[in-house]
Image (cartoon, coloured by chain):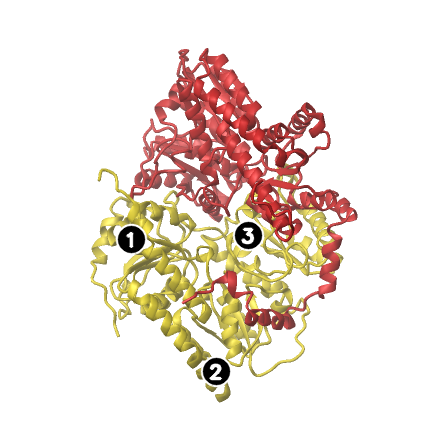
Amino acid sequence: MLRVIEQDTEKLIEKIIENYPEKTKKERKKHLIYNDPECTSSICQIKSNVKSRPGVMTSRGCAYAGSKGVVWGPIKDMIHISHGPVGCGQYSWWSRRNYYTGKTGINAFGAMHITSDFQENDIVFGGDKKLEQLCREIREIFPLAKGISIQCECPVGLIGDDIESVARKMTKELGIPVIPVRCEGFRGISQSLGHHIANDSIRDWVLGKVKGILEKETPYDVLILGDYNISGEAWSSRKILEEMGLRVIAQIPGDCTLNELTNMPRPKLILVHCYRSTNYIARYLEENFGIPWMEYNFFGPTKIYESMRKIAKRFDDKIVEQTERVIERYKPLMDSVIEQYRPRLEGKRVMLYVGGLRPRHIVGAYEDLGMVVVATGYEFAHRDDYERTYPELPKNSLIYDDPPHYELENFADALKPDLVGSGIKEKYVYHKMGIPFRQMHSWDYSGPYHGFDGFPVFARDMDMAVNNPSWKLIRRKGR
Amino acid sequence: MKVQDHVKLYRREDYEKLFRDKREFECPYSEEEVKKVDEYTKTEEYKEKNFNRKALTINPAKACQPLGAVLCALGFKDTMPFVHGSQGCVAYFRSHLSRHFKEPVPAVSTSMTEDAAVFGGLSNMIEGLENAYALYKPKMFAISTTCMAEVIGDDLNAFIKKAKQQGIIPEDLPTPYANTPSFTGSHINGYDAMLKGILSYATQGLRTIKGEKINLILGFDTYSGNYREIRRMLNLMEVPHIILADISDSLDSPNYGDYEMYPGGTSLEELKDSINSKATIALQKYSTLKTGEFIKESWGQSFVNIPYPVGIRNTDLFIDTVKELTGKEIPQELIEERGRVVDAIIDSYAYIHGKRFALIGDPDLLLGLLSFILELGGIPVHIVCTNGDEDFEREAYEILKREPLFGSEGKVYIKKDMWHLRSLLFTEPVDLLIGNSYCKALWKDTGIPLIRVGFPIFDRHHMHRYPILGYQGALNLLTLMVNTVLDELDRETKDSPSFDVIR
């Protein structure tokens, strides 16, 4: 069924970009479209994955954020060195909510800030000697760390340090893998290249290099790839897969161990959650080990049932039948969530602006609650992400790529959404505007939102944001 | 329907089982091994190793220079913090400050990438200024740098000149700038450099006319309540004043249902006028070193550095300094306020007296807190300052010596981090810990109650809206401290006859 929103999105776009200087206007125009799911021509394609214009106030981060903050950071039994000055590690410390089990500082190191804290001398004379010493000290101070990754910050690449040879030397000397990651913040144009670099470093420095243990293989072995376990939701997804009769031999990278990384070439099927940040390694595993991969979406019952059935089809009848039984078991609960919350949220208009997969993946969950996504977009998506997005959205909905603050604020003013879902940098702007808001990177310190255990939380939180009485307290100036 | 979120879910048996089963694939160390190492990290032997670290920094209590520069810039009206370098840095500064203040934080980046690393960031600077000016219409750009721009050696001054020559932004648009390399100093130095940059730019070529006003600089101070409290006290004393880099309205603005990008800050008129003031009082020293030099040398203005007015003695000093500089009398209201807060302290001292404290934070904050703890009869034991230098160390010991009965045990650790403090807390336990939100990891490991003071405070709401400066600030801190002790006492006695209702 083709869903249509009545809004003149094209005209709106024209109006918003008027204020840009000529060059930026020309460029930004290509990053804004109104959705036409049926259009196959290239004019309906949004431009993406190019440099943000300087000075526009982009929300984007950097390659370091994509590697240390996203892909490597959650590997819990390794130490991830923020190699360079103190700031990057400080600002990305314990902030992403990629949950894990284990004792922090003893056998798990997620919520920590480990840095070489570069000083002027390190810039002038190079940081390699310090890095060696630092790796040795890690071995002493954290004897149970299973490995080390070196997450480069900007200066490292600029001063020409040879962290690869430090890594090789230290791997030998310390007897644990030391992995160099060239994710200096100035590389690429967003977090996205950091994901890619991190994927490549797993390929080059873990696979085939680090020995792991997996006692046996079964025909039902799967691997979760690209779930960051934000507020523990890789667990709520894992639970579903296990109930379906599958065996999750690794959960990457949320709550992941080095050993699980080494299990990467062993499953029968790879289940890709965040396509954007992990498709590189998935393709590599497919090409080199012949392991198939597929994407899935566990947001909201409609998509959960759909994904479960799609996954089950890859296995035998036993799994297919068991999957139906699981769906049957949870359906009454899901229906009761919808019954409770849908009347309170029906027809509410949602504007989204998030990262890797959520701008399209959560659309279904909103629709389960009767809400309409009128605008969505990504910080760092590529063409293939947008191609996956068009069919998920109603016709005429607005799609923006890397919209600066200026655009978001003005689009919100014009579209008058009932709810905005975006990040911490956006949150308080909308609070000031009196528009209900939820952070959709961290789930606003709530969650999980995936899976059967997540959907009730999602519904509760969206209802809370939209229907909290405090919005009514705002007295507009001059009234 | 009772919805269970992450708080309850992962304690449920189904998840407990999931965690147990997952271990099969984790290849984990045995529980005994983990326990053994855990215990080992609490020993003297481990502490010695820990303090022997030369290259490794673990959980430091400091951020980098441009964060301070951005905070400073936000203290001026209609000013856009403009950071030349990689864009990820600005995303981080904005997130970090928003998480603390629960407020929007505007700032732009010149988004330098590989090509800028090779060719320099001139075109990024020029386009950045053009775009930001067109979109956000600031009346001033406060320009700072990330380490990328510093390493490749971009010439800020030349770049900005060029942008103006090309007519990208108006010639008369103020564009103060500061070099803020993140590989020297910390956020407090970035604040200092930016403030000096702004003051020198804004008053360039202006002649000093000695006026009646007093300038106030709070330093890297993340309590919006502090700015309001200082202003209130000065108003009570009827002292005409200019608060420089006043973030109170820009980072704690009223909700009128409209977003305003520049809701407050020191106005550009006040900024220019600050050169005419009779004197400048800085409430912090280590975040105003360069600015102070500048004011003394270039403006020829008297620059008075007083200790951060935390506690009664330091607030007295502040008020006396203002009185001395202006000849204004201390109003009855402040005298009464002081009396009430002293009375409150006397009512509560029994719960603070003899309590042993560990503290971690910025140097000026620590000096202020030390002074206050000694007034209450508390015993500072571990004083850790990641971004402190030898001067700070000496000053801290001087304060400790003022009250030998309470201060003699105190030991000051400069350039140390929270992992050092962890060892200290295990080998020499204390009763109370004072620090920022990240210290909750120490609370978790040691069980020592945490009193959240400093920056950042992410996990408790609105604390920055309540002053910690002045008499009112002393009362707020006292209340926080004594009630933390009392909460702890209830927890400790809840299964004993000592579980009293009156304390």
Q: Find residue B143 and report its horizontal and vertical position in percent.
A: 44, 34
Pointer 3 with pointer 2, Cβ within 8 A: no
Residue type beneath disc 3: Trp
- Chain for numbered disc 1: A
Relative vertical location of residue A329 with respect to residue B6 in this rendering, above or below: below
Q: Chain of mark 2?
A: A
Q: Residue at x 54, y 33 (%)?
A: B188
Q: Residue at x 49, y 65 (%)?
A: A233
Residue A29 marker? 1
Q: What chain is tagged by disc 3?
A: A
User: Which residue type carries mark 1?
Assistant: Lys
The label number, if any, that marks residue A314 in the structure image? 2
Q: Which of the two residues, B217 or B449, is positioned nearer the viewer here?
A: B449
Q: Nearer the viewer, residue B280 or A369?
A: A369
Viewer-nearest of discs 1 and 2: 2
Q: Can you give x and y, in whole percent of width and height, for residue A391 in the image?
A: 32, 70
The type of residue carrying mark 2 is: Arg
Position of B148 with respect to A39 (left or right) is right
**What quarter of the picture does the N terminus of chain B occupy?**
bottom left
Q: Position of residue A82 (x, y in %)?
A: 60, 49
**Where the C terminus of chain B falls, by quadrant?**
top right
Tag 1 and tag 2 share a subunit: yes
Image coordinates for residue A477, horizontal then vertical, percent: 25, 39
Chain A pictured colour: yellow
Same chain check for tags 3 and 2? yes
Farthest bottom residue in view: A317
Q: Secondary structure at mark 3?
A: loop
Question: In what element is the residue under mark 2?
Answer: loop
Report the chain shown in red. B
* Label 3 sits on residue: A94
- Give the quarter of the image for residue A164: bottom right
Q: Is residue B308 visible?
A: no
